[in-house]
Image (cartoon, rainbow, N blue to C red):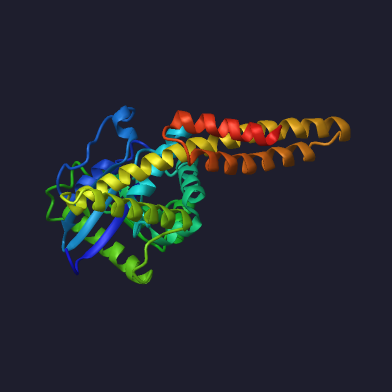
Amino acid sequence: MEGMASRRIVLLGKTGVGKSSLANTIFGEAKFQTSHYNDLKTHCSQTGTKVVDGRSITLIDTPGFFDIGRCEEELNNEILRCITECAPGPHAFLIVLKVEKFTDQEQAVIDKICQCFSEGALKYAVLVFTHGDQLPEGMNIQEFVSQNENLSALVKRCGGRCNVVDSKYWKNNQQDEQRSNQIQVAELLKTIDKMVEANQGSCYTNEMLQNVKREIQKEEEHIRQSSANMSQEEISNKAKISVLDMLSIRLAGIATGALLGALLGGLSGLLALTSTGGTDAMLLAAQSGIVRGGKIGNDAAKEAETRVEAMKKAAGAVWNQSV
């Protein structure tokens, strides 16, 4: 694949919007598992790579990261998995929405995406609408977007980039350009190419993603030296799994340290509240405890080999430094 354009693309959106079906539509085959709305099998990231129209495309099909009521621990673990797969960063985020009314719930998903990846991620984002068959006859996706002020504003934040597909009815339609997946996927890939060119070939990245990439490279070198017969793909996959395990353990330590730090900080703040009659001291103490406890937990978890061990080490370290 030397000299071939390479694209790492992350699909984001709530459960049930059709992310996996979109991934299959892009690849032109059923490579990603699609399941019912509340099927637990859809709660894990899926990754695949294929050459499409002269481009080597890696798709990271994420679960419904931003579903209301999703367990925080489960959310964090899947975000870690996504980060590990796309390090040092994706060339594009595909924010997947249905052709339907844009409600406060959809807006909340967008807000959470920006909180997680920063507003700057929209510079690398394309809105992709699924269920294109729901478009009224003769209406294109730009006209649909223009009917909603909030949706129009979102598209503008994404550089005016939006496309539409339909996994059910547009598969074999070659007559109508607006209602053919083959044509719409080609347009989507062109949109991504133009965006990558406008971003001077760079991918979306941050310090965390760069650190993960360095950890993967170090682990690859370690595996390469100890397993000479493994292919590069096997080495890369094994390194990602190893780094993901390490990050998961580290996260358990950070979470435990932050929680205990907040509790202990809040306790000291409560004593201040008793003497001063104000709440500011209590809040500041709790916030300080979260930061300090998280750092202590992270350091303690470096010596752990399991999540449980990381939690125990973090709890012990925070407690010992607080009493």
309 lies left or right of 52: right
Quarter of the image that includes the N terminus: bottom left
**Viewer-nearest residue: 146 or 304:** 304
Residue 279 position in % (x across, y down):
79, 36
Q: Quadrant of residue 321?
A: top right
The residue closer to the viewer here, 88 or 49, is: 88
Residue 140 visible in the shown view: no
Relative to residue 268, is residue 102 drawn left or right?
Answer: left
Q: Residue at x 32, y 40 (%)?
A: 45
Residue sitting nearer the eye, 92 or 308: 308
Q: Can you give x and y, in whole percent of width and height, for residue 183 in the image?
A: 18, 58
| Residue 293 in which image quadrant | top right
Which residue sits at x=30%, y=62%? Answer: 192
Residue 119 falls left or right of residue 2: right
Name the quarter where the C terminus is drawn.
top right
User: How far across and down, in percent of the image, does residue 250 sit?
Assistant: 47, 40
Could you say where residue 15 lies in the image, as x and y percent from the top left? 36, 36
Q: At 42% from the left edge and 52% from the top edge, which residue is drawn?
A: 147
